[in-house]
Image (cartoon, helix red, strand yellow):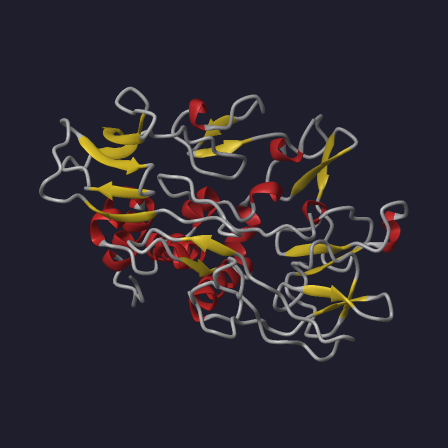
Amino acid sequence: MAASKMILVLQLTIGLSFAFGIDCSAYTCKTPDQVWYPNQCGFNNNITNTYYVQPCQDSSLECYPDQQHSTSYQFNYTCQETYVPPVNSYPGEWCKTDDDCAPGLSLTCQNGICVGVSNGEYCSWSEQCNPGLRCTNNTCIPQLQIGESGCTWDYDCVNNAACNIISYSNPSQNTCYGFHSFKVHDEVGECYSGFHTLCQYYYCAQNSDGKSYCTDLFYTLQGPGSQCDVNGRGCYSNKDSFFTPPYSIEGECDCGLNSEGNSYCEVLPGDAPNQQWLNIFNEWVNSPELLNCNTVKRFDSNCVQTYWSSKQYNAFVYYNLQSSLYNRLVGIEDCVLNAFAENYVQARNAFNNSNVEAVAF
């Protein structure tokens, strides 16, 4: 998984589509002349492609789609009880009872921590193994240290390292290195989808010599959260002239939750909102607490919450959401923010209450 983006995933209440050639919906507040049924919090008028919204008055309820009250031309939303997902903690993460530990992995809760399979014992997946271990040939064995060879993916390496893959057929050529230890224009092994966790700034690319190298830091030329063009494009980065031809990336264009139905560019690694997230993420990567996590769950927010202070954890969650949702929240009205982006609002409030300086919408 040397090329997977390892960030926690937190979703908006509603789904949002990419804006490549797609007309985006508009989102605005309920108007005074609209008559709604009890507990209604929104509806989508399919004719005008507009969502009208009001937040739930009861803080214990959230705004969810309501098939029962919907029609072919109007999809309604109703305030409903908040769904609280099960804890599903993995080895090394907090628990109160065995039921809090992820099912199907034979985990037990001991002294407030989920305990899994020990060194030398049978396993089916690395998720079963206790921190410091990986599942290889159905046995939990120690992770490879930085500088050791034989890895086939990041999870074979200690939690603060990743696998530089040269050959899948001959793993002895693959070596574990510290995260982000490869500097700009250093040669790197497999460059999957232009991304590599070993690179200082995450991105890599193949050059004219057929080899892959870490790129320079990319930022959005028009600035973070800039509006896309009429074709849902225009999210271009600066160019890295080390490559032949000069290499650049194009960020994704997403529909926002604004009243104009506009689409905006995602933030790139060099954009200010993403820099705040990368700073706190790198702090976790370089912390000794990271080593207390299961190898597959090393960046899971549940493990961060288990070992970091509430102040650090709140910053971790908030900056991640601010970065990943930045373009979707440009120009958003408060009523829409509180109805359809409650995860973000809750994270922002927790962050502000932790007395950490915030840059928030």
Residue that appears at 42% across and 40% down: 15
Q: Is residue 76 visible?
A: yes
Residue 255 lies, with reference to residue 269, above or below; the image says above
Left or right: where 194 falls relative to 335: right
Residue 273: image x %, image y %?
42, 66
Where residue 337 appears, x then y in whole percent? 27, 50
Across and down, in percent, residue 4 comes to: 64, 50
Decide if residue 227 is on the left or right side of residue 139.
left
User: Compared to 341, does 64 lie above or below?
Assistant: above
The residue shown at (58%, 24%) is: 105
View extreme (right): residue = 170
Residue 359: quadrant of the picture = bottom left
**Residue 294 seen in this snapshot:** no
Nearest the camera: 272 or 351? 272
Looking at the picture, tell me which residue is in the foreground, 249 or 202.
249
In the rendered image, the residue lying farthest to the bottom is 241
Left or right, residue 21 beside residue 65: right
- In the rendered view, would you say 50 is above or below 219? above
Residue 236 x, y percent position in the rendering: 56, 69
Up-down relation of residue 219 to residue 259 (above or below):
below
Q: How many marks?
A: 0
Give whichever of 181, 138 is nearer the camera. Answer: 181
Q: Quadrant of the C terminus?
A: bottom left
Name of the residue lying farthest toward the front: 47
Which residue appears at 15% of the width and 35% of the height? 58
| Residue in the image at 65% along x and 70% along y | 248
